[in-house]
Image: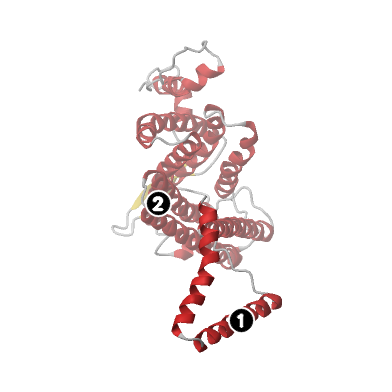
Amino acid sequence: MALKKKTSTKNPPILSHEFVIQNHGDIVSCVAMLFVVGLMVQVTSPLAYMFIALHHNVTSTVQDSEYGVPIDVLRYTYGVRDACAVFFYFLICIVMHAIVQEYILDKFSKKLHLSKSKQNKFNESGQLLVFYVISFLWAGDIMVRENLLTNLSSLWLNYPHNTMAFTLKFFYIIQIAYWFHSYPELYFQKVKREDISSKLLYPTLHLVFIVGAYLLNFNRVGVVLLSLQYLAEAAFHTARLIYFSDKSESGRKGGYTIANIAFVVSRLLTVTITVLTFWYGLALSSVAAIDFEAGNFNTDIIRIGSLSVISLLQAWLMWNFLTFYLKYMKEKTSQKNKAKPVVAKKPKATIQDRITKAKKKREEQKQTKEDDDLPEVDQNTKKNLRSRPVAAAAAQKAK
């Protein structure tokens, strides 16, 4: 499917940087189509099949629990050929990224009239939200099929888990391919050089932990922890999209409140499951040395190291979360204080001012008493004489 090109007043030269950036979706989709077309040609079919299909499958015979007859079960391990599948689905992720951007996010962002910085955040949240929701639902389906939710001890029982179902292996292939595709996306999005390091941190952390769980046969606990992480991240990016699209204050607060609760609960559940699996569960079947042939990496060093790394990551995420919101609350309080009207306080009267005021009051009382002792005609005469200087001063001021 050809992607709609963005209109521009000037056509860039072919194979220039601007040409590749504007048409990267079409270019990558053509490369991916070569593999698909290669399946239809007998000569190139084995090569194309190596990139599209999953490999390293093993067939085991188990006894059917209902009918008691032997049945063949197809399972998968990992190997070198997985790199070919990762490359092909890496191309598919780039194409899907361009499709979501062109046909969904661009249409919404045009209606919102966002600034350039806000539009970049809107596009980022939209892309990640689609991926997180799909991955969370996919992980939930795997956990239900593998009975990981009802039987938590299956996370460590019968380790090493060196064979996987098709859906579980395909899940890890897509996860690795998606986070690898984040690197060229920095080039396609024209990210500034000073922002590249911060943008690389997030996908790199995901890749390290996903590849580690995949290669060390911790695939069951890995899919559970990823589902918790993706649930919290989906809540956050949903709240951010609401913030950009909803103008009401109630909608913004409600979205971020749910996202904050999901983040904290996700961190607590992640630490709890990690401790149960690596500290208690896997300790029951720990081995002295790594058995590469059996795929058993359950040594004390790897087990405690995995526990420490995951726990430190959760602590780091929680620290960033707390420092961000403490800074946010501090800025909000300072803004409220600036918005309040400043009332000028009256200066406190000094002792000298009080003495002068008391003298003036006594003189007024003495003058009033003297006027009361005079007859009524004399009182009126005296009042008229006092008012003349005041009237003269007012007339002079009016001139």
Element on which disc 1 rests: helix
| Colour style of the rendered protein structure | secondary structure
Q: In the image, is 93 to the left or to the right of 204?
A: left
* Residue 207 pos. (x, y %): 57, 43
Sequence-first tag of 2 and 1 = 2
Quarter of image, res 9: top left
In front: 75, or 148? 148
Above or below: residue 316 compared with residue 35 = below
- Residue farthest along the left direction in this orientation: 67
Q: Please say if the residues under marks 2 and 1 sit with CB atoms less than 8 Å apart.
A: no
Q: Residues within 10 Å of mark 2 (few under 14, many from 20)?
A: many
Residue 219 seen in this snapshot: yes
Residue ID for mark 1: 363
Q: Nearer the viewer, mark 2 or mark 1?
A: 1
User: What type is the residue that disc 2 sits on?
Assistant: Ile
Residue receiving disc 2: 142
Residue name at image x 66 percent, y 53 percent: 290
Q: Find the distance from the CA under tag 2 to the CA under tag 1.
A: 97 Å
